Amino acid sequence: MARETVESLLEKAQRAIAEGQHAQARAYYQQAIGLRSDNPDAHYGMATVCFLMNDLASSAFHFKEVTRLDPLRAGAYINLGAVYNRLEQYDEAIAVLRRGIQLDLNRAEGYYNLGLVYRRKGLNDMAIQAYREAVRVNPRMADAHYNIANIYYEKDQYALAIAHYKQALEVRPGWEKALRGLEAAQEAAGGAADTAATAASAETAPTRTTSRKLDPERQVDGTIHGDILRNLHRATIDTDQQGRAFLETLEKKVEPAIKELSNCLLYPDTPLSEVTTRVREFEEAVDALRKLQENLKSHVGRVQTIGEQLLQS
């Protein structure tokens, strides 16, 4: 009988897993590790089959061996993070998941598992950010959309919850959990809208307004209204410029600042100096936007005032 090699044992183990014979696969991997204890593929296979058999402690041990023997294998870190999550070792899970993501920024499952850990720790905003990164890499990750929707539902942000339940259903039509979530969110959104409308009608005193009736035969005379028309034209141009400046600041300063701050907060052990810098940049961008908003409101008010002058002349 030919002597078994590590390669032949790994092939037998993979066939055994495919046939659902996990105990037999584990025995093959154990033999392979006995022949070559420094073979990362043997430890990876052993870690996987131990996970399938719910032997989480052994699975973690062998995934750690893979990271020691092959420090650049991103999948080992990500899978180890998933195991740590199941073992409720959340800080360890975050550390290895971050390492896996650093090695491969395009592993959606890394971000997804990070979202699961943050969710378990009650860090819901960070969980949303991680799940968003997962669907950015893989837009068809229905579970990530579903988990985002659940968090928004719990935060009473029903419109966002509805949007993500729908995105989950676009990927996985007829998914019962997502359908139930969507129905609950839509019902809650309707109830919230009714409550808000009732409160508004109760708190707002009825007021009588008079509207100016315009004479359809009335014409604007340049010799009479020339100054007003010129002022209105100038005010309209200024208002348009202020509106463009507002939108440009929102797009080029505020949105990038929000993204940088969110990415920074995704990792709880980010240096305080970096967090402080990102917060300052965000505050500066928002402050600039507020000033432009006030300017825009002032210019809009001026257009309205001149318009009223034209109507009354």
Image (spheres, rainbow, N blue to C red):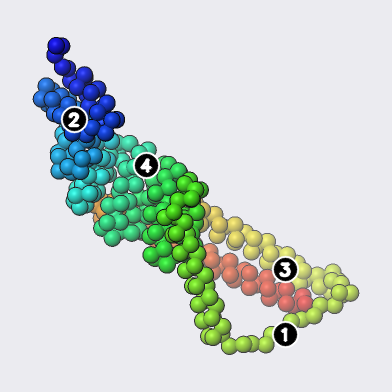
Circles 3 and 4, Cβ within 8 Å, touching? The answer is no
Residue placed under numbered mark 4 in the picture: 108
Q: CA distance from mark 3 to mark 2?
A: 85 Å
Instruction: Give the residue at x 73% y 65%.
Output: 233
Q: Percent x, y for residue 163? A: 49, 56
Res. 210 mark = 1
Q: How would you rate the neighbour count of disc 1 (Cα within 10 Å): few for under 14, some for 14-19, many for 20 or more? A: few
- Tell me the quarter of the image containing the N terminus: top left
Residue placed under numbered mark 2 in the picture: 24
Q: CA distance from mark 3 to mark 4?
A: 54 Å
Going from N to C along the chain, the mark reached first, 3 or 2, is 2
Q: How would you rate the neighbour count of disc 4 (Cα within 10 Å): few for under 14, some for 14-19, many for 20 or more? A: many
Q: Secondary structure at mark 2?
A: helix
In the shown orientation, is residue 279 left or right of residue 40? right
Res. 71 mark = none
Relative depth, front residue between 293 and 59: 59
Q: CA distance from mark 4 to mark 2?
A: 31 Å
In front of the other: label 3 or label 2?
2
- Tell me the quarter of the image containing the C terminus: bottom right
Q: Amino acid at mark 3?
A: Leu
Residue placed under numbered mark 3 in the picture: 232
Q: Is residue 107 above or below residue 240?
A: above
Q: Is residue 252 above or below residue 188?
A: above
Q: Amino acid at mark 1?
A: Thr
In front of the other: label 3 or label 1?
1
In front of the other: label 2 or label 1?
2
Circles 2 and 1, Cβ within 8 Å, touching? The answer is no
In front of the other: label 1 or label 4?
4
